[in-house]
Image (cartoon, coloured by chain):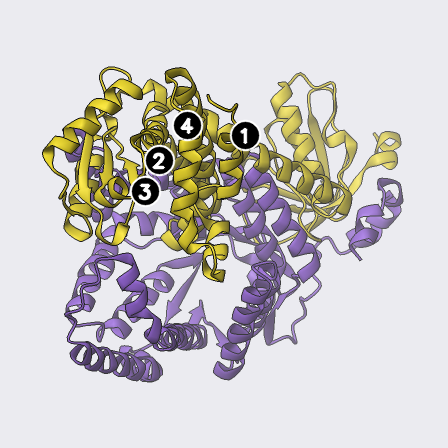
């Protein structure tokens, strides 16, 4: 016994699980079946390592072994003897990994190299998740859900808008029907999304898709256009939002980010989870605008609407607010991509197309 | 210093060294019969804790939050094991797995609380509502379970703490008095705090020794006089403001709301400041009251925490965290914890060596308790 002991035994503090008294002892390496011996005042205590639980070292606190009946063996030195985690034990791999982790975690926690590597890995993962993971999940889920998922939301949104800003439309019914027919002929698939006409009020010239696929067009927009094709271009863009289920995707993406934030921070306070979610949500909505532009581009080319009508209207819409600083600042946070960026493609379109 | 500890290889720890430490049979740095009082010592440092904190965050993010219970155990263990009394450390022995289950339950609560819009119109909304009601109704029970979990997993000299409060008292203190506090517009708050602390301390045991809090509710009222006056001031200002504004502004629209709030921002900041001040003063005063009037067996605790120092540290910490965008959170926590912990001392009624003879209380009943529905940790 003595020869083995002198080579690798370690000093420990032994607690018998009954009293608060700490006994100085010597812990020797285990035999084949995992039995270790702690010698305290010439008394030997036999304990089985297989049933031990390791309390990992932390900060400057050495590791500790917990046995049944609250018997506890505290190491005096920080380092963890290798024989406490033998490789040849007949235990499962996860258990071995766990022991390895428990014996090394305090070293990793204090090593700048590991921390830096972890930091980089984390940044890469967060970037990948936000850039690819969440959008893919949102798209797959959105297409898997039925189209009427958001009908309730659409109804309440329209009600709220009607209450706050929108007024009944002043456009004659004949003109409304004409626009609907043009839309069905030039842009929409069958069944065509419903068009809803409203007086925009504070909203001004605008068109937007409701979550259930209906499209709201304001009187101001109808007045602003110089050619019906301009309106068709805008409607093609909005139809893109509907076809690609952007409302649902946005909601799913926002909710999954919020869920992740809550899971990670454990904080359900709205300020802490909503602000970052909104910021990230904005980048997705810019992505959606690009997709809707793509859709409009494709649809207009297919059905033979000259592309410049899109850029004509867009630049006219953007004109009045381009001069002040506020508008420039808003651009950074806006839900739409920079206007010049959007125009280029439609302006560069093959002439006469 | 850490590096040194880390590097000390196994080879240097021979049997010869062990023999020396071993000589007495019982090792205890502090034990000598002349000691009559000991102070709590906190050895946590900013740098190591910052690293642990950072690693916890990284692993939590990398594991999509699955690591967070383990992170919590690491954090708690850092604070527990770096707190010592009379030369011996505290430790936390809780299993992260148990906390993980607690987290899942908390997530369930959150989901059912936020799902009413999603489930609208389906029968599931009634199930979610019922579940939410049950969970709210059982908050006192969950609080008690959390105290038991915390106490049972706190060890000092390898002897466990134990919490024996009944669920009846928990329901009375947290539901009954909680409701009365709201009805009294908060003026019953000091009494509720008193009962809450009494519930926490008077049922706490360390081994066979029992904690007891010798305090009258009037002293809590007296200690909290400043926060209560602040509360009255806040109420009157709010009432005056409400009358002044007449509150007939249509604040439905977002733009309107921003315009409406803009001139009030300094007032809002002042209000947040007052609320924070109230919170800090109450926390410090309650801490002082409790730790100056609590006994463990016959040994008395005492704290020399100064209200002004405490407020100064909290105020400084607030700015530190805001300016560093959260990176100085570990520094702030270490600072305030060190101040709190090191302010406490204990004067031994008997020979402190007697503490070593304290034994684990009734192990058998203890083991039975384990099978009970304990082990809930809701991070409350």
Give the colour chain A carries in the figure. Answer: yellow
Which numbered dot is residue A348? 1
- Chain identity of mark 3: B
Which of label 3 and label 1 is nearer to you?
A: 1
Q: Are marks 2 and 4 on the same chain?
A: yes
Q: Residues within 10 Å of mark 3 (few under 14, many from 20)?
A: some
Residues marked 4 and 3 touching at CB (< 8 Å): no
Q: Look at 54% across and 38% down and name the residue there.
A: B67
Percent from the top left, x then y, of residue A191?
A: 22, 16
Residue A155 in view of the camera: yes
Percent from the top left, x then y, of residue A81?
A: 78, 36
Residue under circle 3?
A: B110
Residue under circle 2?
A: A251
Report which quarter residue A304 is drawn in: top left
- Chain identity of mark 2: A
Q: Residues within 10 Å of mark 4 (few under 14, many from 20)?
A: many
Percent from the top left, x then y, of residue A216?
A: 23, 37
Query: In the displayed structure, would residue A252 be above or below residue A243?
Result: below
């Amino acid at each position: 016994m003595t020869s083995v002991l002198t080579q690798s035994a370690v000093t420990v503090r032994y607690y018998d699980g009954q009293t608060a008294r700490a006994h100085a002892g010597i812990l020797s390496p285990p035999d084949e079946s995992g039995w270790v011996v702690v010698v305290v005042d010439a008394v030997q205590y036999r304990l089985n390592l297989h049933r031990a639980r390791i309390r990992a070292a932390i900060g400057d606190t050495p590791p500790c072994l917990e046995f049944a009946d609250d018997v506890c063996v505290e190491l005096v030195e920080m380092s963890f003897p290798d024989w406490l985690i033998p490789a040849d034990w007949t235990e499962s791999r996860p258990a071995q990994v766990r022991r390895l982790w428990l014996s090394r975690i305090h070293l990793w926690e204090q090593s700048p190299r590991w921390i830096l590597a972890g930091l980089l890995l984390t940044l890469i993962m967060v970037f990948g998740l936000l850039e690819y993971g969440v959008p893919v999940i949102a798209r797959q889920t959105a297409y898997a859900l039925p189209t009427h998922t958001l009908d309730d939301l659409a109804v309440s949104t329209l009600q709220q808008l009607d209450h706050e800003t929108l007024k009944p439309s002043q456009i004659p019914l004949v003109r409304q029907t004409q626009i609907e027919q043009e839309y069905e002929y030039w842009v929409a698939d069958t069944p065509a999304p419903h068009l809803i006409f409203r007086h925009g009020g504070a909203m001004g010239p605008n068109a937007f898709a409701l979550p259930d696929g209906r499209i709201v067009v304001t009187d101001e927009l109808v007045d602003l256009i110089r050619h019906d094709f301009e309106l068709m271009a805008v409607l093609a863009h909005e139809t893109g939002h509907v076809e690609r289920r952007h409302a649902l995707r946005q909601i799913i993406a926002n909710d999954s980010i919020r869920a992740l934030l809550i899971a990670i921070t454990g904080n359900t306070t709205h300020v802490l989870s909503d602000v970052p979610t909104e910021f990230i949500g904005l980048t997705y909505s810019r992505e959606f605008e690009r997709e809707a532009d793509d859709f409009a581009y494709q649809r207009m080319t297919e059905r033979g609407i000259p592309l410049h009508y899109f850029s004509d209207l867009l630049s006219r819409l953007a004109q009045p607010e381009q001069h002040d600083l506020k508008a420039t600042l808003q651009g950074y946070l806006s839900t739409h991509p920079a206007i010049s960026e959007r125009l280029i493609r439609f302006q560069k379109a093959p002439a006469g197309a | 210093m850490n590096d040194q500890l880390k590097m000390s290889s196994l080879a240097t720890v021979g049997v010869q060294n062990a023999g020396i430490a071993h000589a007495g049979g019982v090792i205890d740095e502090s034990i000598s019969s002349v000691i009559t009082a000991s102070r709590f010592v906190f050895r946590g440092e900013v740098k190591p804790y910052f690293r642990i904190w950072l690693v916890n965050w990284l692993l939590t993010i990398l594991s999509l939050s699955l690591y967070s219970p383990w992170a919590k155990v690491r954090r708690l263990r850092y604070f527990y094991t770096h707190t010592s009394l009379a030369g011996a450390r505290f430790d936390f022995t809780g299993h992260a797995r148990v906390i993980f289950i607690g987290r899942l339950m908390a997530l369930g609560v959150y989901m059912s609380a936020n799902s009413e819009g999603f489930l609208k119109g389906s029968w599931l909304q009634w199930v979610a509502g019922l579940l939410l009601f049950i969970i709210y109704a059982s908050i006192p029970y969950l609080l008690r379970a959390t105290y038991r979990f915390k106490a049972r997993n706190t060890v000092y000299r390898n002897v466990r703490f134990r919490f024996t409060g009944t669920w009846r008292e928990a329901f009375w203190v947290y539901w009954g008095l909680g409701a009365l506090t709201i009805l009294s517009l908060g003026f019953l708050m000091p009494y509720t705090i008193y009962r809450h602390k009494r519930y926490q301390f008077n049922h706490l045991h360390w081994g066979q020794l029992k904690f007891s809090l010798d305090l009258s509710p009037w002293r809590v009222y007296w200690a909290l006089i400043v926060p209560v006056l602040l509360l009255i001031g806040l109420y009157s200002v709010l009432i005056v403001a409400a009358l002044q504004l007449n509150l007939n502004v249509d604040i439905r629209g977002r733009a309107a709301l921003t315009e409406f709030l803009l001139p009030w921002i300094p007032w809002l900041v002042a209000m947040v400041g007052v609320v924070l001040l109230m919170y800090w003063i109450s926390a410090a005063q309650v801490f002082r009251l409790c730790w100056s009037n609590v006994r463990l067996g016959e040994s008395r605790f005492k704290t020399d925490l100064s209200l002004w120092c405490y407020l100064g540290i909290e105020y400084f910490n607030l700015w530190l965290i805001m300016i560093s965008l959260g990176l100085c959170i570990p520094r702030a926590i270490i600072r305030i914890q060190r101040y709190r912990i090191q302010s406490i001392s204990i004067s031994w009624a008997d020979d402190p060596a007697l503490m070593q003879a304290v034994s684990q209380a009734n192990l058998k009943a203890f083991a039975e308790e384990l099978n009970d529905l304990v082990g809930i940790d809701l991070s409350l």
